Amino acid sequence: EAAMNMDDSDGHAGSVLWTLRGMHAKAAEAVKPEPRAFAAKLLHFVSSLDFFEAGQITGHYADALGAVGLAELERLALEALDKLPSKLRKAKADIADEYSSDRYSLTQIAEDCAKLRGDVDAQLALKQRDLSDAYQYLSIVELLRKHGRAAEALKWAKEGMFVFEDDPDERLTLACVS
């Protein structure tokens, strides 16, 4: 709570928090907690802190969680995501919803778990949960291209251009011609 109420424009407090997180991850690795329980505690901890980088969880805690813990972490994140309303295109004034930070953190955690497993289809399914703006389509296009799925990438680029024809993203146009 204190971290959210301090001026950290020089980055010192953030640096201390990063160091503490690293120490915590090393301690967890040494202690080898029960993986499922640790995954639940970790997800609760991350979702309660705005400053914590959710996208860094799997990388720092993968060894402490192990395969069983990572699977549980992903399951719990997906379960929580399923409770949030779908996020399709909204009017610009309505883009930010009350669930955005939770949605972002949970999605990052689940995507990172899928990446560690090398499961591109799971990553794709997660990205398809949020089609609220043209950038979301672009992230799908980039993922598919990265994994040699050019025909699917082109389909998503065209769909994004169609859905957002009144608010185009030139990167989708470039994805169609390159």
Image (tube, rainbow, N blue to C red):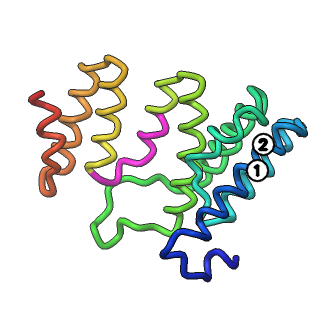
- Label 1 and label 2: CA atoms lie apart by 5 Å
**Above-or-below relation of 17 to 114:** below
Query: Which three-letter amino acid code belongs to the residue tagged 2?
Result: Lys
Question: Residue 51 location, x and y as percent?
Answer: 59, 65
Query: Is 56 on the left-hand or right-hand side of 41?
Result: left
Q: Position of residue 63 (x, y in %)?
A: 74, 32
Give, as a single range, the part of the protein colored magenta: 125-133
Q: Position of residue 17 (x, y in %)?
A: 66, 62
- Taking the magenta stretch, the answer to whether it contains residue 160 is no
- Screen quadrant of the C terminus: top left
Task: Label 2: state its secondary structure.
Answer: helix
| Residue in view at x 27 percent, y 67 percent | 92
Q: Nearer the viewer, residue 68 or 76?
A: 68
Image-quadrant location for residue 21:
bottom right
Q: Label 2, on which residue?
A: 26
The residue depicted at 31 percent of the width and 19 percent of the height is: 149
Answer with the quarter of the image where residue 37 lies: top right
Determine which of the numbered discs, if any, sits on residue 103 in the image: none
Looking at the rendered image, the quarter that the N terminus falls into is bottom right
Query: What residue is shown at x 61% (from left), y 82% (from top)?
Result: 5
Do the residues under discs 1 and 2 have CB atoms within 8 angstroms?
yes
User: What is the magenta segment's predominant secondary structure?
Assistant: loop
Residue extending furthest toward the left = 177
Looking at the image, is 138 positioned above or below residue 169? above
Identified by mark 1, the residue type is: Met
Q: Identify the residue at horizontal 53%, vertical 62% (top origin).
A: 101
Question: What kind of element bears circle 1?
Answer: helix
Residue under circle 1? 23
Horizontal relation, residue 69 to residue 176: left or right:
right
